[in-house]
Amino acid sequence: MQKVKNNLLIIFVFAFITFVYIVVLFRVGQLALTSDSSFHFSRVEEIYRNLSEHHLFTFIASHTFNHTGVGNFLFYPAVFLYPWAFLKFWFTPINAFVIWYGLFIFTTMVIGYYSMLDFSKNKTRSFVFAIIYTIAPYHLHLGIYNYVLGEFIAYTFLPLVFLGAYHVFWKDVKKWPLLAIGISLLLYSHLLSVYLVSGILICLLFGKIIIQKSFKLERIIALGKSAILAVLLSAFILVPFMTDFIGQKIAAPQKGFGFLMTMQQLIDPSISNTISINRSVGIVVLLTAIFGWYFVKKNPVEISIYCIGVIFLLLATTIVPWGLFEHNKFILNVIGEIQFPYRFNAYSSLFLSATASLGISQLIERFSVDYLKKSAWVAFVLVSIIGYYGSIQPVFDRIIAANHNFLTENKGNLVSLPINALINSNNYDNIFSYLVLYGETDYYPKFSANHTLAYNQSIYNNQVILGKKVVKLVPKVSSNTITYLVRKSKAERTIDLPVIAYNRTLVKLNGKKVNYTRSFRGTVQVKTRLKNNQVSVSYQPSKLFYISIIICWLTWVGLVLTWGLKQKPGMRLTDLKLKK
């Protein structure tokens, strides 16, 4: 009972701290949009409108992304966008986002706390780690400043992934499900993070084998079981990739190493603890990189954590010759997927936050008098709140700089969303009258460089091609379905719609399912002699997708039941073994 009370207390404390972190955002009631904001806001809007029409699953963009049927929902996980979409039924659009952001701040603290508690068995250190890791400037930059929300969500689950890997590779092999659960939650969040984490885990595994010259059979089996469980939990994410992406010549983000920074360019914003730039890891992480060795020098495991954190910090800078790697096809194909080396800031924040929590918790625990120790806890929380609001000040500065220049509806030619466009609950819907700032044409068909711009423009401008004639039409849309009413002459034998064709695309002509071909621009093309035509394009997932959904739910239920049974007195097998 006391354990339950302690858990409820820590959850309440984290909930209270989260409220303090987000309450000012409620009062402001405005956001200045930039970077990936309109991409993710449009995805949530699509999910919300489909839910309004009583459709749970979203496969293609019919209401948003200019009704092109782009499949970013198929290839970019949207699982954790659903809570945000549901919140829109009860709250204003701005408040729904702020609450959703707060939920992930809270969840990051909770996962961080219990992951560190499992690792260190020290509540003080776990609490300190949860706070430092959650309010690390790079994390806040992803979430509330630059709206890189896929990576922001993935950041939440990194402690769980590496805790699971720690147990499988080195510690308690019976905790192998933690690795599978962590990887699955990453798959629900951001596929690129899964790719990056997988590479890191492979490096850690090779490092272990080289140093210790062994990897026991039980650990190999545990790793295999983790992989199988991860597939069961996340197959519904992987199935669309297998059916519609692999080998289909679909455009993906370009490989490379962009936004490179020198060490000095990392240090300067980190000292100011700002979140306005992706180069900042914050003053705590930076100081830990410099002085953290002092706290870890007597513990080999802690030394490893500290060194890994420093390595990630260096990997984010031009100390590594990233520019040279762009000329090596092998390295570019393997590592170039990361796109931006500053992404390593998430991992330096994780590992160096762990080292920082060790040092700070040691300082707090030096107080022998109880009230002094409690005072130190309170002081730490207050400093974290002050530091948090100091870090996110650029969010408010950007809103002020917009000078009430609220986003108006775009009624002319399609243009990209203006940078730092100011929105509130009254003009929120105006977002969707613009092109997405970054990502509008992600997962379009892949064209040669000479044709990419012209073909893409013809698609998102809703240009229907009738033989050699081009007309612009406005489609009727519903959940996962785009319908064009097309009137043509008998001489025009084909209708080329500005709706992207995927493997599982379904086309109906005048209410009847028909075969279609892919046009030269990768869109749906049908043949018809009729003058008046109603052409509907939708997406029909494979049966394997729905089977994988059922398997996923059953697996989660099984995990929860297994965990619940182990919590009952007399059911803890590890405890029974200890008693013997």
Image (spheres, grey):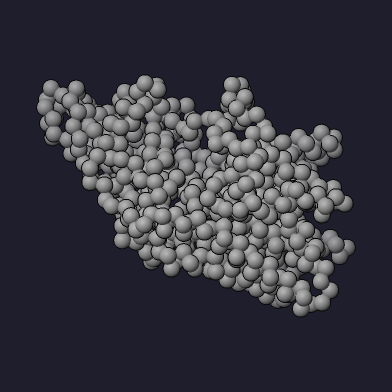
> In this rendering, would 90 be left or right of 484?
right
Task: Please indicate whether residue 470 sits to the left or right of residue 292 in the image.
Answer: left
Question: Residue 191 at x, y = what percent?
Answer: 54, 41
Q: Position of residue 416 (x, y in %)?
A: 34, 41
Depicted 176 relative to depicted 567: above or below: above
Front-most of residues 143 and 205 = 143
Image height check: is 234 above or below 7? above
Looking at the rendered image, the quarter that the C terminus falls into is bottom right
Residue placed furthest toward the bottom = 371
Q: In the picture, which quadrant includes the N terminus?
A: bottom right
Q: Is residue 268 left or right of residue 87?
A: right
At 39% from the left and 33% from the top, the residue drawn is: 444
Query: Is there any visible trace of residue 160 in the rendered image?
Result: no
Q: Total number of numbered labels? A: 0
Q: Nearer the viewer, residue 470 or 286?
A: 286
Residue in the picture at 32% in, 55% down = 406
Q: Quadrant of residue 5?
A: bottom right
Q: Is residue 251 above or below residue 555?
A: above
The x and y percentages for residue 359 are: 78, 58
The residue at the point 72 percent across, 75 percent down is: 375
- In the rendered image, residue 229, in percent from the top left (x then y), is placed at 63, 46
Residue at (72, 36) in percent of width and height:
203
Q: Nearer the viewer, residue 205 or 532?
A: 205
